[in-house]
Amino acid sequence: MTTVAKAGSEVGRSVPRLESREKVTGRAEYTHTMRLPGMLYAKLFRSTVAHGYIKSIDTSAAKNFPGVAHVVTIDDIRKVISNPYYGPAFHDQPILADGKVRFVGEPVAAVVAADPHVAEQAAQLISAEYEELPAVFDEVEAVSATTFIHDELKPAGTFADLKHLKGVKNTNVALDYRLRRGDVDKAFAAAAHVFEHEFKTQKVLHLPFEPHATIADYRDSGVTLYTASQGPSFVRTEIARLLGWPENKVRVKVPYLGSGYGAKLYIKLEALALALSMIARRPVKVALTMDELFYQITRHPSTFRIKSGVDKDGRLIARKCEVFWNGGAYADIGPRVTQKSGLTATGPYDIDNVWIDSYAVYTNETPSGALRGFGIPQLVWAYESHTDMIARSLNIDPIEFRRKNILREGRPHATGTIMKDAAIDKVLDKLAERIHAQPLDRGSGHVRRGRGIGIALKAVITPTTSVAIVNVSADGSVTLYCGTIDMGQGSDTAMAQMVGEVLNVPTETVRVVPRDTDVTPYDMGTLGSRSLFHMGHAVRRAAEDAREKLKALAREVGEPEGSNTPIPALFVKKYGMLAGNVIGTGVYKPDYIPPAPETGLSENVTAFWMISGSGAEVEVDTETGRVRILKLISVLDVGKPINPRIVETQISGGALMQLGFTMFEKMHMDGGQVINASLADYKIPGIHDLPLEMENICVDTYQSNGPFGAKGVGEVSTFCVSPAVANAIDDAVGVRLTALPLTPEAVLRALRAKQGKPLGDE
Amino acid sequence: MLSGQVVDDRLLGRAGEAAAAEAEILSDLRGSAAYKRELLRVYVGRAVRAALQTGVGG
């Protein structure tokens, strides 16, 4: 097939994804299906105990199993990697359990064999004895518990603001972030009304359709990792650190990802695969099954205590937030979630007196990390439910109450950063218009209908760095080298559009090189809706640099200013034949002022704000508690969309994912054991769970410091779905749910409690 | 209980109660026994009504 496209106006065009054809024809490469010559497979033996000392591990039967090459415990790993601990924020996670297990499912031993089925069978022959310790699962209890998950805190040193935690003992709190502005106590005393509520979110997980997979091929001269990762640069840094090697001896290659949603960030299976390849001296693949994902990484469960003071005119004058994040057994990126999302816990409101405490807490469960929103959906669930409860209690229309209190352009956010390019007002206005576009039929009998909304903001994680290279070959064809991982979000296409826009070539002709740290330059990672903005700027600058160098080349070969001589002719004039390259480079790191440690205040806390609103219209069956989503509206400020069609799919995808977390997804835990660790028992949204109608709307905005006026979109539609639905349920039947998910049973129990006929416990 | 009777709300209510009393229902992660029993009460009536409306099983 030949690709024909016209150059010009590449940005803003709904270019079909560059990789679509490869994917739908099954030719796209994924780590999970990749095989190397001579490769061995590893399978894991996992802890059945939530917290305990390992007394012994019996690997003899597994070692004697025909076809097994190696059975590996931490003692074997220590012989090849002397300090086998890893992690992005804390170096707290051992490659295999080291003397102690901290959650059910923690890897304790690995079996390596040429046949994955042999490895799996042999792993089942391993047994371990534990001396059990008291375990702690609840994030609030863990703060004051006398059981400590870790003997001391081990911050990684990657983040300057965690250094003070080094060596702290006798605590489960990995980070306490605080923000103080004004005087909340005084304001509460002066308030006409004070409201206080507590909200909870459950443990859920990403479930990327391609589970985690890594192949490590270790040689004395260097190591190559093929890995399903959202952050190859970070993997390279961390693997180099574990080996004590320079980074240029570590090569990380990442093909397309079968999605990630934050599950594949930082470092996951890479350290284990490396160690096993060092021991086996062959390439070793570690690839999880769907069921094993339940023991890899999840979203943080949370408890959020929120208190607000309102004056007699319905103005919010004080808000106090206490947020507990259940980080599980290893910190992963939890401390970043706690701080970088914690700072927006008061919501998109203009409140003079604010007080936030946000705690990253260790517990004896599967580690928690980033999941499409970096903690924001948990916060919004609480503050938008709370805000709605206040409005209803004061008999103020929930939309009017918000309108009276939202942060407007030019006003200071809780951190002190002045709001800019944050269209909270436009989002609220559009949402109000769309949710009430038709009159509401409130229903009758056991069918009742209602509407609810929520609005939110997120500060993009700042500061982070991206680097890009644009190569113009002598024939005029253009190649882009950038480390952003296309895991289904369409970034390759959007980045190519920006190159096409600057260099005036059709997007379809721009080649985006697959991720390979030997080739593609540094990027912080594909996370937190940062890539389009940060990498977008780096790509734009690289393309502009190439454009300037082409102009210089034209001048050098004697072309008049503004000449339209074809690019190949310039190269031929310069080199006497089709030879040479023009290389443009671009780097982007936004300005930033770190928050003051004592107050959390900063005049420049974020590179940009993401603004989101959701509206839900629901139908509740008052006899069964079943909730049908009749309409789900997402209204976003994403700046100017680079590719409107991809933006639209990002919006609906994010909203539906969060709808699953809202309505039914939950990891059921019993004594630290996940009792529904499979897709048979853990339900994700299917076709019958779709809202009858969805509206996806971007308000007309332009991000003044964004590349071509754009900013990130990947997570933004997730933020407000949960409170919008809960607020709609309240509107329909007058009951308030304060814990996710909003199951039919939870709704019916609330209804029956309200009627004075509570359902029994059993 | 329903055979040969004229179906009305009261009878369907009693049928639901009878079904709920007789069925062996366990609590599991899909729902508590109390909730599932409540669903049975509701759905026995709804199922009979739906069957009568569509003429199924007459």
Image: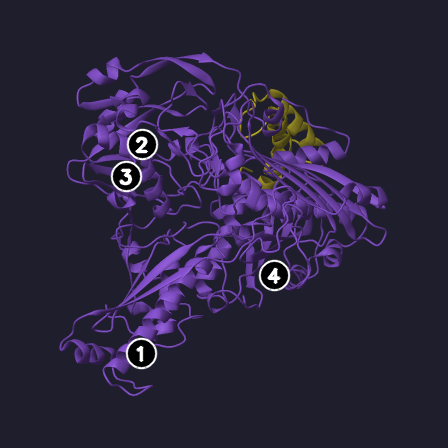
Chain colours: A purple, B yellow
Residue A272 got which mark? 2
Looking at marks 1 and 3 on the same chain, the residue that comes earlier in the sequence is marked by 3
Name the residue type under label 4: Ala
Mark-to-mark CA distance, 3 and 4: 44 Å
Q: Which residue is mark 3?
A: A245
Select label 1 or label 3 by which is in front: 3
Q: Is residue A108 above or below residue A640?
A: above
Name the image quarter holding the C terminus of chain B: top right
Element under disc 4:
loop
Report the chain holding disc 1: A
Q: Which residue is mark 1?
A: A551
| Tag 1 and tag 3, C-beta contact below 8 Å | no
Residue farthest to the left?
A: A576
Looking at marks 4 and 1 on the same chain, the residue that comes earlier in the sequence is marked by 4
Mark-to-mark CA distance, 1 and 2: 49 Å
Q: Residues within 10 Å of mark 1 (few under 14, many from 20)?
A: some
Mark-to-mark CA distance, 1 and 3: 41 Å
Q: Which residue is mark 4?
A: A422
Question: Looking at the picture, do discs 1 and 3 lie on one chain?
Answer: yes
Say whether residue A312 is left or right of residue A162: right
Q: How many marks?
A: 4
Mark-to-mark CA distance, 3 and 2: 17 Å
**Residue A665 screen position, x and y as percent:** 52, 38
User: Residue A661: in sight, yes or no?
Assistant: yes
Name the residue type under label 1: Lys
Q: Is residue A566 above or below residue B52?
A: below
Q: Residues within 10 Å of mark 4 (few under 14, many from 20)?
A: many
Select label 4 or label 1 by which is in front: 1
